[in-house]
Image (cartoon, rainbow, N blue to C red):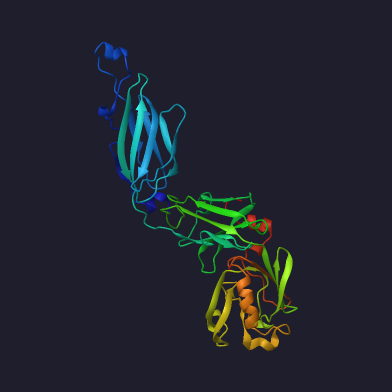
């Protein structure tokens, strides 16, 4: 469906081609004034009031533009540039849906007459509005495996157009790429992942200049901006063959914990590959029926650290104490003693990667099942960009 069928026609601009002669002035000492003749009229200005998603164009006839200001009701300036020759101005960005703009265009004729033309125009409301959810949170500090992740409320069929408006900057020129995938919720999602784990201390900023962009499933009516910082380098190595977890900081092992992973055979096996710590959820109720495992368990679980949307956690599991370091007997999670879980919970940070291996696992963590982008090669990840 085209932008014109989704957006009702924009309201006509007011005062197009108007000339405010009261705001004009002639050049001092000009021959016209010396002989008493009428000074020349100022240039005429036309504002092409666009539909949402189109740029604003201002043109001058009989003179050149010396300045153009387009401002919405909130005082936000729609920036633009005067073209070579000075007879036209085009906004750098499209007009947003459901927005009223004030235009002030100043001109100058060859004879020195200046003038200011003022007009207004409005764009129609969007029939469908798209919004997004950003992770990680603004001004947070996260681990070296955390991607920048955007989940969209409505479908994004114009992925290239949207991705062009997503600008990531880092304090050290980190190489990275956007990749499009389906979130576990079924919604469209775009993640920005570095080529390798982030360097500690990196500052990351996203400037999503999406206002006025048509996603194909709805219009964006605002911009988004967020930023976060990368914390110390911590990597959690989980060896389910050896039934142990090792926390590495700056490449050195700082602690090892005996664990019990998912029971071999069937759906109770653990996932393998790299999962990123999504959230530290504390004490929560875990019900096996919510992850398709029947009525195997329904209990309160302490020091819960979410690794996937499908329900794999690292957590305290005192009921499995006999198996820590000896056998994998959980329903898919990585269990440890309450004392070990308490200390480990305080040591890890959201965004820390968990590198999990084991012969008796059920598969690799998928990209959209939490943050599984690290399970793709760099080339395979770059290929998921809409601009690749």
From the viewer's perspective, is 354 left or right of 91? right
Residue sitting at 59 percent across and 74 percent down? 305
Residue 122: percent from the left, percent from the top? 32, 46
Taking the view exactly as shown, the residue that stands out farthest to the top is: 35
- Classify residue 318 by image quadrant: bottom right
Q: Tell me: residue 196, above or below residue 58.
A: below
Q: Provide residue 130's location: percent of width, then percent of height.
A: 43, 58
Quadrant assignment for the N terminus? bottom left
Residue 385 in view here: no
- Relative to 167, 44 lies left or right: left
- State the image quarter where residue 243 is shown: bottom right
Query: Between 298 and 265, which is closer to the camera in this rendering?
Result: 298
- Closer to the camera in the image, 200 or 335: 200
- Labels in figure, total: 0
Image coordinates for residue 387, horizontal then vertical, percent: 58, 50
Res 227 visible: yes
Residue at the spot 72% in from the left edge and 84% down from the top edge: 327
Q: Nearer the viewer, residue 202 or 371?
A: 202
Residue 325: x %, y % from top left: 73, 82
Res 271 → quadrant = bottom right
């Amino acid at each position: 469906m085209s932008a014109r069928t989704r957006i009702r026609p924009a309201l006509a601009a007011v005062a197009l081609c108007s000339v405010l002669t009261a705001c004009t002035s002639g050049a001092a000492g000009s021959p016209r004034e010396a002989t008493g003749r009428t000074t020349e009229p100022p240039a005429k200005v036309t504002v092409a009031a666009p539909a949402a998603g189109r740029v604003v164009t201002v043109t001058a006839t009989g003179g050149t533009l010396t300045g153009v200001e387009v401002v919405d009701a909130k005082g936000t300036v729609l920036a633009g540039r005067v073209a070579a020759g000075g007879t036209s101005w085009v906004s750098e960005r499209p007009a947003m849906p459901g927005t009223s703009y004030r235009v002030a265009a100043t001109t100058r004729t060859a004879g020195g007459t200046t003038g200011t033309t003022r007009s207004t125009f409005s764009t129609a409301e969007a029939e469908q509005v798209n919004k997004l959810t950003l992770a990680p949170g603004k001004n947070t500090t996260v681990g070296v495996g955390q991607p920048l992740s955007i989940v969209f409320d409505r479908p994004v069929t114009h992925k290239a157009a949207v991705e062009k408006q997503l600008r990531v900057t880092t304090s050290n020129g980190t190489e990275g790429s956007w990749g499009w995938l389906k979130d576990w919720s079924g919604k469209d999602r775009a993640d920005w992942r570095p080529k390798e784990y982030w360097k500690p201390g990196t500052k990351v900023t996203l400037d999503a200049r999406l206002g006025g962009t048509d996603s194909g499933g709805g219009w964006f009516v605002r911009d988004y901006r967020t930023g976060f910082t990368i914390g110390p380098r911590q990597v959690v190595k989980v060896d389910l063959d050896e039934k142990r977890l090792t926390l590495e900081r700056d490449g050195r092992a700082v602690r090892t914990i005996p664990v019990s992973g998912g029971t071999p055979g069937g759906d109770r096996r653990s996932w393998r590959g790299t999962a990123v710590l999504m959230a530290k959820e504390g004490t929560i109720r875990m019900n096996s029926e919510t992850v398709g495992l029947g009525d195997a368990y329904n209990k309160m679980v302490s020091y819960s650290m979410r690794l996937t949307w499908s329900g794999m956690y690292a957590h305290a599991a005192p009921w499995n104490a006999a198996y820590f370091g000896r056998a994998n007997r959980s329903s898919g999670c990585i269990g440890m003693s309450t004392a070990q879980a308490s200390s480990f919970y305080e040591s890890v940070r959201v965004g820390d990667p968990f590198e999990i291996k084991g012969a008796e696992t059920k598969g690799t963590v998928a990209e959209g099942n939490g943050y599984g982008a690290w399970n793709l090669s760099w080339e395979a990840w770059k290929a998921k960009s809409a601009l690749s």
